[in-house]
Image (cartoon, rainbow, N blue to C red):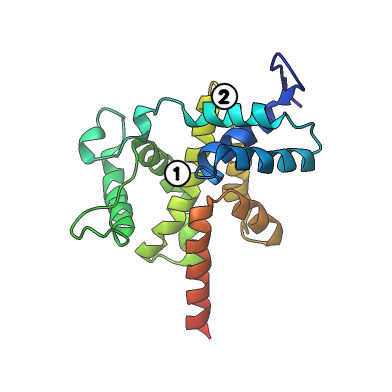
Amino acid sequence: MNIEKTGRGPKISLEVRRMIIGQAIHDNKNMPRRALAVRLQELIEKMGEISPTEDTLARMISDARNQQPSELDQPWNIGACDQFNIPADIIPILIKIQKLKAANNEEKGTLGKITIREALWVARLFPVAEPLIARLFGGDEDNLWWLTFIVSSYVHREQISEQMNEQYPDTSDLDGLYFASEDPFNDVSLNAWWSTIPPEYQQVISDAVEQERSITH
């Protein structure tokens, strides 16, 4: 296990630090920092680690949330493709994803927003994810939602990796989870996969599955 020195108090492993940052900026990004610090203490102890103090955790949460935003997290548009080496042949897919997201827009006649970082990961993952999604869920364009769920896992991993000052994000577990198994949605894989999905997407998936079940019956 990799251990990082903090200068005071218990040493914090890199695995725990990744979890703290992930909770702070993604899973519980809107939770007040003191409440999240208490929750993190419980999670860290369940991992068999010695938890930092509540003050230390609150400070780490603030540090994670106060990072200067990356230009990659700015909204994507077609004009940004050349600057960020986003291939032109992926633009139709990005537009379709924007249209799917626009379904929830109150302002009619506008496209939903995706970030430059998301667009980059769509370009990287679509060639390998599209056959998987088509095999499991069919070729309906609405099933591009599943692509956005997969992309979100990689986006979040990269953002955490940047805050950790890592050379690149280690996505080995995500690669194996999504693309190594012939049946990525067996019971074991499904539980692991579910844990990678941001909470805001989990309800959308549950609603979609329930709707599909009602149609089938």
Considering depth in this image, is 109 or 61 the residue closer to the camera?
61
The kind of residue on which mark 1 rests is Leu
State whether residue 82 appears in this view: yes
Q: Residue at x 57, y 32 (%)?
A: 61
- State the residue lying farthest toward the left: 109
Compared across the picture, whether 32 is left or right of 4 comes to: left
Picture coordinates of residue 3, whole percent (x, y) = 73, 22
Confirm or deny contact between disc 2 and disc 1 (CB under 8 A).
no
Q: Which residue is mark 2?
A: 164
Q: In 3D space, how far apart are the residues under numbered discs 2 and 1 (Cα atoms)?
A: 23 Å
Q: Which residue is mark 1?
A: 125
- Lower sequence index among marks 2 and 1: 1
Label 1, secondary structure: give it. Answer: helix
Q: Is residue 136 above or below residue 22?
A: below
The kind of residue on which mark 2 rests is Met
Name the mark on residue 151: none
| Quarter that holds the N terminus | top right
Q: Residue at x 50, y 33 (%)?
A: 158
Picture coordinates of residue 133, whole percent (x, y) = 48, 58
Mark 2 crowdedness (10 Å alpha carbons): few <14, some 14-19, many ≥20: some
Label 2, secondary structure: give it. Answer: loop
Q: Quadrant of residue 139?
A: bottom left
State whether residue 130 appears in this view: no
